[in-house]
Amino acid sequence: MVFYLSWVTVSAKIRRGLYEKLRRYGISVSEVIRRALEEEVRRREEQEVRNVLECAQEILRKIPPEEIVSVVRSSREER
């Protein structure tokens, strides 16, 4: 399986003083931005999973435990 990476350019305006400090310290702006964006996406995806799990938990609380046990047992017997 072959994956082709496709890139886009993202730009941002920053204060000149910050830009000069970035250059002085040799900070790779693209690497910092890439890592920050990847981390933010990861956090948002984790939050999305948490929200789905909370919703599922609310639904499962409404089902009596005996019914869950019954469904699991019948599922095992089908195998």
Image (tube, rainbow, N blue to C red):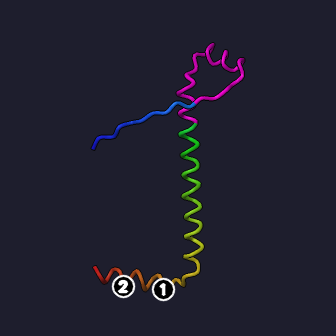
Compared across the picture, whether 22 is left or right of 45 comes to: right
Q: Secondary structure at mark 2?
A: helix
Q: Amino acid under label 1?
A: Glu
Between 71 and 31, the one lying in front of the other is 31
33 vs 78: above or below: above
Q: Amino acid under label 2?
A: Ser
Between 2 and 8, the one lying in front of the other is 8
Per the model, the C-alpha gap separating discs 2 and 1 is 11 Å
Compared across the picture, whether 61 is left or right of 16 comes to: left
* Residue 2 figure quarter: top left
Residue with the mark numbered 1: 67
Label of residue 10 in the image: none
Q: Position of residue 55 (x, y in %)?
A: 58, 68
Instruction: Say which residue appears at 63% left-offset and 29% top-offset.
Output: 12
Q: Position of residue 24 (x, y in %)?
A: 63, 13
Which quarter shows the C terminus?
bottom left
Residue 17 is covered by the magenta coloring: yes
Q: Position of residue 30 (x, y in %)?
A: 54, 26
* Residue 5 figure quarter: top left
Residue with the mark numbered 2: 74
